[in-house]
Amino acid sequence: MNRLGFYIENTTVRWMREALRQVKPPVILIHAQDRGLLRDIRRELSPDSFIVGRLYKTIQQQKEWLDSDDPERYGREFAEEIINYDFQLAKEIGANGRLLIDAWMSLNEALRGPASFPDYEVDDLFRRRADAYDRFQAAFRERLEQDGLVAVAFNFAAGNFTRPEHYLDWFPRTLESFTYLGFHEYGWPALKPGPGVATSALYYRTCMDGIAQRYGNKFKVIISEAGLTMAYGHPENPDKGWLNEIQPLTEDAYWQSLLWYNNEMLKDAYVMGACLFEVGHTSKWQTFRHLGEDNQGNAILLMNRIEALNDIPGPTPPPDPPPEPPDGDIYERTQALVDALGHEKEVIVALPGQADAVERLLTPLTAPAAQGAEAVMLSRNLRPRVDQITATLHQLQSNPDIDLDKIEAMLVRAGHVSQQLDNLQPRVGVIDDASQQVQAVQAAFPEQKRTAQSSSGLLTQVDDLLTRAQRLQSDLPANAFVPPEGVQDLREDMPHHPTKTWPTRSLSIIKRVVLHHTVTSPETDPVALARAIISRRDLPGLPYHFLVQGDGDGFWTEALETQVAQTSKTQINEEGVAVALAGNFTNTPPPDAQLNTAAAIVAQLVKTYGLNVDTDVIGRSEVDAVASPGKQWLQGAKYKYTLLDKVRALLQE
């Protein structure tokens, strides 16, 4: 599995499009100036890449914003500049239905961090700028979100922020409101810690462990810059990459760093990937290049190596312990049986197609693999022959009957051949590895194909069991929820992701109701909101079971058997029903009409599922470190208690 992505500054560098098509990088950070390339990425080059846009600002400009009296203003203005940049590039949808750019950076390496101060004793300038940056980022994100866009926070220089408290102490507004966090990680002459190595690699993990303890597991991490630079650990600190002219590295040495870093990122599910600086290089950063030729004119083969990672499965998580049988809960046990059989059916149905796909991929590789093995053997046989010829020529130098000049000329030619063989060795190693992998798959594939082709009998048995389990489930008495009068049932009309679905659950597991606010217009249409969330957040559908508009119109949007991702807490998602109020209730409470409809929905849920009004009706902010359903929920107007009073009154009728 590959987590190595691209940092693209120059979109016209040779082989760029081929590299995108070949690698399909998981993440891309791009200087947003090439709408044509972005359209091509979404159409066919790498449609599923998560793309972060950067609008370049000078260090001086960034400092002026942070030193101003109103950093929030400049955060909003920068967001508006992005929104309106290049005829609203930020809002263009690609051919695959996704925005051309998924998320936008705020500032880049805008702040010197605590780890760069002696003994971590920061000065007053840092304190002022850190507070300003926290306010800037919060305003930047909020303004982008108003137009349906997403922001990426931080992106500090490598090694400046190395402890959880460096983020927790200075950026509470950012951590409360952001989902995507950016980190820069560099080293020299390697990324993996060791003797003689200076590296910032994996500081992200140290920091995220502490951040998650306070804010939960809501974050996604993007290593927005990664690589090797002599500025990190070399005595002279030149900002030069692995192909510098002072102390260049071999491609093999650089690859070992990338391979190690990729394997480490795979251990952290919240890491989306690392943007290698720079795959789309400019002349200033030429020594960091990943495309073209190295300093000796040899082709750089890093893209082939990265592509090969796509065929390697990621780490298999340890199996979950078998759940304890529920005590007398026939609903839950039946649902678990249906889910398990449905999953097994999907696996079995997919087997023949997967076998055919492997065969289609394997067939054209057979001849090249054999040729590659032959080339490896030829290369290995040539070395002793050249060495033998060289030794013979040296012996002939003492023969007075042979022209010494001709011997010298032949020795020079033999030396050239020997040097060419040395230069070929890295490529020969790659060919050898690839040939062996293909041959291993060829040896194992026939048995796997026979297993896939013989799965029809097993499919019949599983299909029969699934039908019986579904019939049993349909015969069970259900906890029937009847929506209150005036609440429109839109469950059949709501849009959903073409491939993703929410998990399902037994109705008997419902134990609480969770209130949310949408931070959108009070007139937000549930269908339009669902489409936006599916497109921009890549979720299966709307993460709310009910939505109530500001004028009191209510909508039933998801089946109660659906387990939506409404919080960062798995248990709450499993047991909770999500009721969302359209609007933003940070400064004012919801209007009475909206609360009346919400109370009617909550009262019906309480009555149907035997819930306790005082303990089982909560706001999201009571389980997650977020503002939803607004500060007025428990502060100011404290509209939670107004809502609960209305629920009690309805239950007494």
Image (cartoon, rainbow, N blue to C red):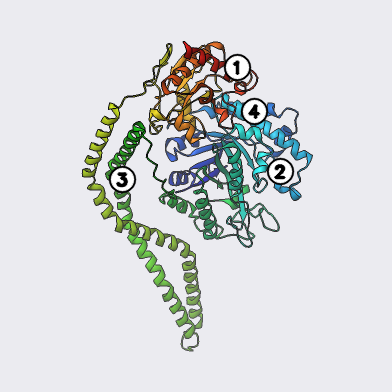
Q: Going 33% across and 56% down the picture, which residue do you hit? A: 441
Q: Residues within 10 Å of mark 4 (few under 14, many from 20)?
A: many
Q: Which residue is mark 4?
A: 139
Does the rendering let one see residue 543? Answer: no
Q: Position of residue 337 (x, y in %)?
A: 32, 37
Q: Which residue is mark 3?
A: 354
Q: Amino acid at mark 3?
A: Gln
Task: Say which label, 4 or 2, has the lower sequence index.
Answer: 2
Q: Residues within 10 Å of mark 2 (few under 14, many from 20)?
A: some
Tell me which corner region of the image, top left, top right, bottom left or bottom right, holds residue 461: top left
Q: Which residue is mark 2?
A: 112
Q: Position of residue 254 (x, y in %)?
A: 55, 57
Real-space Cα distance between discs 1 and 4?
A: 22 Å
Q: Residues within 10 Å of mark 3 (few under 14, many from 20)?
A: some
Real-space Cα distance between discs 3 and 2?
A: 51 Å
Q: Are marks 1 and 3 in contact (CB under 8 Å)?
A: no
Front residue (pair 447, 384): 447
Real-space Cα distance between discs 1 and 2?
A: 40 Å
Q: Position of residue 629 (x, y in %)?
A: 56, 23
Q: Which residue is mark 1?
A: 589
Q: Residues within 10 Å of mark 1 (few under 14, many from 20)?
A: many
